[in-house]
Amino acid sequence: MTGRNEGAGRSPNRALVSYSVGNRTGNNSKGTSMDEEKEGRADERDFREIAQEIAAGFIGELEHDFEHLAAKLPEYADHPMYREIARYAQQYLNNGLSLEDQRLLEELANKKTNGMEETLEKINFALFQREIDQAFDMTESLVWEIENIPVCEDDAQVEYRRFNETFEQILYGKMFKPEREVRPLHLPYPETYMRYGGLLFELKRYDEAKAALIKGLHYNPLHFDLYAEYTESVKVTEEIEKYKEAALAGFDLAFRARNIARCYRNMAFYYADKELFEPSIACNTLSLRYEDSDNARVEMFYAFAKTGERVILPDDEEIAKCAEEYGFPLVPNKLALCIAFQARYYHAQRGETDFEKYFEGILSEMARDRFALDFLEETFGGPESGEDEKDGAEDGGETAENESG
């Protein structure tokens, strides 16, 4: 969603679960009529029979069977129990796979991934050429493929997620505490839905855009750019207080400097819209500590012009007082900051230089002002310390190592 004004509480579970994609099939309510129950049973028998019919075309050669499944499923796209048909047919394909077949299935999935990524590159080029209709048609085809020819779908034991980097996976485990096994999703589902949502937004189909972005967030709730697009959709489709909630929740996902800066700019927009210019200026001041931004400066000058005051940036004491009064965070993501500190210390103690540098990089992006440094001092004894929190560091480091592995 390019070309729009920027704008992105504190409970991650409340804020993030609110946009998670629920069970698509559901159960019959207690008020279901006898006829409806019979119809439901008929549908159940029907979709199982269809799945068996598809499976009857399998010949035991995985590549053939994979292509057969992909070719047959679209024939039943309009069936009310389509997803159940797809799931059962996929199970028939997966049952009894040897290790070699599993490896081949992964290769076929990787081939599909490469094809989707090539299509996304074509979509980006079409957008660069301002060929919006062509880009939309290609994107819509990808979305149809995701939703009608499922390759990786969650079930009672497994959930599939696509993370951009190790730290997202670590945060996901800490924030959502998944009970199912989390497996990597190689297909670019989040990126496809982000592009689709952006195109729908450009076409002013705002509610559809928000729905598409929510679907993308299902596959990676920690995808900050995707969440930022979702926040923009909330700005357009809902009242400003809902936008504030979404903007505040963005801090729980941000651990890179540019994303933290975006969060503060989002809050600055909210306060300016409410004509609360003091917190708007404070948030833009914090934003500039994380990323140089013309947008932040323009918004700040606008706020100073509205107040009639001289352009003098607030000091830390004034910002802290403002944060307490208006409710924006001085330390943007305490959980992420603690994890980065503990993991860096843990891997440094073990001499694992690559991991140490990775978490040091995150720590340096997050601890860029007095507020974050003071928090580290109070919690661990400072950004270079670690002895006082050795046990906690080892716990955090082991978690980081397991997740990144």
Image (tube, rainbow, N blue to C red):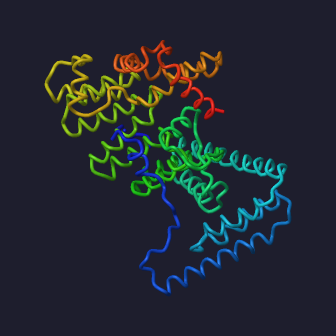
Nearer to me, 223 or 347: 347
Quadrant (top left, top right, bottom left, bottom right) of the C terminus = top right
Q: Is residue 143 left or right of residue 244?
A: right
Q: Residue at x 77, y 69 (%)?
A: 55
Q: Is residue 45 visible?
A: yes
Report the front residue among 197 and 367: 367
| Quadrant in the picture for residue 321 | top left
Q: Position of residue 269 (x, y in %)?
A: 29, 36
Q: What is the tally of numbered marks visible in this picture? A: 0
Apparent side of residue 312 relative to residue 405 in the rendered image (left or right):
left
Q: Position of residue 115 (x, y in %)?
A: 69, 48
Residue 5 visible in image: no
For residue 353, above or below residue 337: above
State the residue at coordinates (37%, 33%): 263
User: Residue sitting at 27 percent across and 38 percent down?
Assistant: 270
Q: Where is residue 46? Give x, y as percent.
A: 65, 79
In this view, the residue farthest toward the bottom is 35
> Furthest residue to the left?
308
Residue 216: x %, y % from top left = 52, 49
Position of residue 314 relative to residue 255, above or below, is above
Q: Quadrant of the N terminus?
A: top left
Left or right: 232 as drawn, with respect to 212: left
Q: Which residue is pictured at 24% across the width and 36% down the height?
A: 271
Q: 136 or 308, which is in the foreground?
A: 308
Q: Quadrant of residue 319?
A: top left
